[in-house]
Image: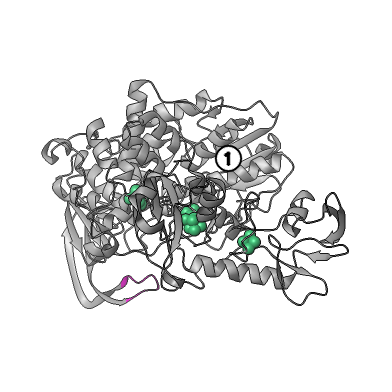
């Protein structure tokens, strides 16, 4: 009866609702959330998705809240175990036939989840300052990181299944350089001061990123570093021919311009006790990096002429001229080894060897770094390991090398190098540079609990240590040294945790639930092959003599052409998608019931609306909106069962011409299946 009010109980709460309203409407009016997908208040209830089911007392069946009317005395439980299980199952079934990428693999594979797809698109559209700003939502030093990052994003880039990945890292630094050159690089806004003080130990990628974020959120941040200038390993470990010092300086200056105070030549233990330092601030982040070279553990390592890789690079970076002689061997196969051998060439060594115990295929260094080192005259000795450093008069005179061969794969799938019994070789040398790894220096930080590796122990999620108000991130914690963008990723989490702590809360990161496609080359067989744009470089004969940048940078035209190759893998609707929001709410396993997908193609036949049948969950919402609200009835569910797809009814041009372009179907699709083109 009209105006009649019905009283019921939902989740133990007394609720009154007009007679004739649904359980879902009554719950929503009372502020109780019931997940739903196919419900729309302007449409007749349809009950297609089954996500809104609830338990009702004395009713053996689960009921669809969107289609069930309220009744006097009804007792509803929206959070019962049976209902939750059924919802989850309903959603898992829907997701099992949902073939879409919420986010691009590039973004997912970037440890800091930088929005690569977004800035690549902005570059494609010539919006270089917007692209730089997009990167700088994640970290403050795009021109530096773009030059040095081993770009895990590119390793996952879908374009590799067509011909070659997008040059994501080079595009990143192009955007930052270009925006700086044009004077359009934007500084982020800084919130009102909170009155809280944060002390950060370490001015490398992690410390700088945490400072940049915390300063934007209104905290007074001071960064302390043991070296004369900020930048950490980017300044003192990466040679200038890869990352010019002025590029880094411009980026650290911009962080200072946000109000961050820099204090250099400051070392914990020497200039202040860690406990005293903590007393100066409301929160502290330890991000002091990994500055000690790992030892090779071979005889002769104490001879004069034996260098640690990062020690050697630091001497050169600070303007020193290390006396390494003419014949140098660099031991190791990572990027630091490549930096060391190429630097040795530039400081005058005539014969430079890289000694690596596996083959080129197993080298962790970037392939381009190996190629460039070869071009500059470095000789590679694969399948050799140092056995003894030979000396005379306390000085290096050579190295005995153990010949190796590859054995069984190790736990990471890499074949283990094993010594070939009795096979050795000697080379004459003036210096040996050990670039096999680096570790943190715990001196001064004894108050902080350590891992078995000797790194600082911090929570893997929010980077809190067991000391109150002290957080730690980057190369100095847990697993130890990694790549710069990995340290940046941790710094972002630590900054969120510090901010929450300073506001009296606690930060608990939650892993988002996402839909991800599984694709092969076949899925992209129809794509035109377009060559990856090549980075112009100085010739090896010239560049091997100096520290000027090797890469000459992309032109705006080349950068735009490169960016246009992007396949735009991530879904345009991610931020509005009801399907993925509900999947997160219910913590759904999106792959558990994955089977064959229903017809998977993208159609663009109805005026300006593209229909991605792969993402459609056949909820019928678009069909009903078109019929009941737009009064056009153009769309229909065509086919039966598993093969059902959304199409303009009868595929009749006259009907299609009647589309009002109201885009009500697009706006009300709970997934990213429809989009205006
Ligand atoms: S439609 Fe939703 S769930 Fe599917 S890929 Fe797009 S955002 Fe992810
Ligand atoms: S093609 Fe574009 S969106 Fe896809 S992974 Fe590569 S850069 Fe990212
Ligand atoms: S395209 Fe239509 S049927 Fe498919 S998910 Fe979107 S609204 Fe539902
Ligand atoms: S069945 Fe109720 S919202 Fe879909």
Residue 575 point in image, percent of width and height = 53, 46
Residue depicted at x 22% and y 36%: 558
In this rendering, the answer to whether 592 lies above or below 343 is: below
Q: Residue placed farthest to the front in the image?
A: 654
Between 593 and 452, the residue placed more toward the observer is 593
User: Front-most of 360 and 318?
Assistant: 360
Residue placed at 26% from the left, 66% from the top? 358
In percent of width and height, residue 342 lies at: 23, 45
| Quadrant hosting ligand 4 | bottom right
Secondary-structure class at tag 1: loop
Crowdedness of circle 1 by 10 Å Cα count: few (<14), some, many (20+)? some
Q: Is residue 272 left or right of residue 343?
A: right
Q: Quadrant of residue 367?
A: bottom left
Identify the residue at the far top of this view. 183
Give the residue number, with chain letter if any, for mark 1.
268
Q: Nearest the camera: 673 or 415?
A: 673
**Residue drawn where x is 45% and y is 41% of the image:** 660
The image position of residue 640, as x and y in percent, is 44, 71
Residue 536 shown left or right of residue 676 in the figure: left
Majority SS type along the magenta span = loop
Does residue 390 appear left or right of residue 638 in this picture?
left
Magenta extent: 409-415
Q: Is residue 480 visible?
A: no
Q: Using the image as rendered, state which of residue 260 and residue 350 is in the foreground.
A: 260
- Please state, as top left, top right, bottom left or bottom right, where the C terminus lies in the image: top left
């Amino acid at each position: 009866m009209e105006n009649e009010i019905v009283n019921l109980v939902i989740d133990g709460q007394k609720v009154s609702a007009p007679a004739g309203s649904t359980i879902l409407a009554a719950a929503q009016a009372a502020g109780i959330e019931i997940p739903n997908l196919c419900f729309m208040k302007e449409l007749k209830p349809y009950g297609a998705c089954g996500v809104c089911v609830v338990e009702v007392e004395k009713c053996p069946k689960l009921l669809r809240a969107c289609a069930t009317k309220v009744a006097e005395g009804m007792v509803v439980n929206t959070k019962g175990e049976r209902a939750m299980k059924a919802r989850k199952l309903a959603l898992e079934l829907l997701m099992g036939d949902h073939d879409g990428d919420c986010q691009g693999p590039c973004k997912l594979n970037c440890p800091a989840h930088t929005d690569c797809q977004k800035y690549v698109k902005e570059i494609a559209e010539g919006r270089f300052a917007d692209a730089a700003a997009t990167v700088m939502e994640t970290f403050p030093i795009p021109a530096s990181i773009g030059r040095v990052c081993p770009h895990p994003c590119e390793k996952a880039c879908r374009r590799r299944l067509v011909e070659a990945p997008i040059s994501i890292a080079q595009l990143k630094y192009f955007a930052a350089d270009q925006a700086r050159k044009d004077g359009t690089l934007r500084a982020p806004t800084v919130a009102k001061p909170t009155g809280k003080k944060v002390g950060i130990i370490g001015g490398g990628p992690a410390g700088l990123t945490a400072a940049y974020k915390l300063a934007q959120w209104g905290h007074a941040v001071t960064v302390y570093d043991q070296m004369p200038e900020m930048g950490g390993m980017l300044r003192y470990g990466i040679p200038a021919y890869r990352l010019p010092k002025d590029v880094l300086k411009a980026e650290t200056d911009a962080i200072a311009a946000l109000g961050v105070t820099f204090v250099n030549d400051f070392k914990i233990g020497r200039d202040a006790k860690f406990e005293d330092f903590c007393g100066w601030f409301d929160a502290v982040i330890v991000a002091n990096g990994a500055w000690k070279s790992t030892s090779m553990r071979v005889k002769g390592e104490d001879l004069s002429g034996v260098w640690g890789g990062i020690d050697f690079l630091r001497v050169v970076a600070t303007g020193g001229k290390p006396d390494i002689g003419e014949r140098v061997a660099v031991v190791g196969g990572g990027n630091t080894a490549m930096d060391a051998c190429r630097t040795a060439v530039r400081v005058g060594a005539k014969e430079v060897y890289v000694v690596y115990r596996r083959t080129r295929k197993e080298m962790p260094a970037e392939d381009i770094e190996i190629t460039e080192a070869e071009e500059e005259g470095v000789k590679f000795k694969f399948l050799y390991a140092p056995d003894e450093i030979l000396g005379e008069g306390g000085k290096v005179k050579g190295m005995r090398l153990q010949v190796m061969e590859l054995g069984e794969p190790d736990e990471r799938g890499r074949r283990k190098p094993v010594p070939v019994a009795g096979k050795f070789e000697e080379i004459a040398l003036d210096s040996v540079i050990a670039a096999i790894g680096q570790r943190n220096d715990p001196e001064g930080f004894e108050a902080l609990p350590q891992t078995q590796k000797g790194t600082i122990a911090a929570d893997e999620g929010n980077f809190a240590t067991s000391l109150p108000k002290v957080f730690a991130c980057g190369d100095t914690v847990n697993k130890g040294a990694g790549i710069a963008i990995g340290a940046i990723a941790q710094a972002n989490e630590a900054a969120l945790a510090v901010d929450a702590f300073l506001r009296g809360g606690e930060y608990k990161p939650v892993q988002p639930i996402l839909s991800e496609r599984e694709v092969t080359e076949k899925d992209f067989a129809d794509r035109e092959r377009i060559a990856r744009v090549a980075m112009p470089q100085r010739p090896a004969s010239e560049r091997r003599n100096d520290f000027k940048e090797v890469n000459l940078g992309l032109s705006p035209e080349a950068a735009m052409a490169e960016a246009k190759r992007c396949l735009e893998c991530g879904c345009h609707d991610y931020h509005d998608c009801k399907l993925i929001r509900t999947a997160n709410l219910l913590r759904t396993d999106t792959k558990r019931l994955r089977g064959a997908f229903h017809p998977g193609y993208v159609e663009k036949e109805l005026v300006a609306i593209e229909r991605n049948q792969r993402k459609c969950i056949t909820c019928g919402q678009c069909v009903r909106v078109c019929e009941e609200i737009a009064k056009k009835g153009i769309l229909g569910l065509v086919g039966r069962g598993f093969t059902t797809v959304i199409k303009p009814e009868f595929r009749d041009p006259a009907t299609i011409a009647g589309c009002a372009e109201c885009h009500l179907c697009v706006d009300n699709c709970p997934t990213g299946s429809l989009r205006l083109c």
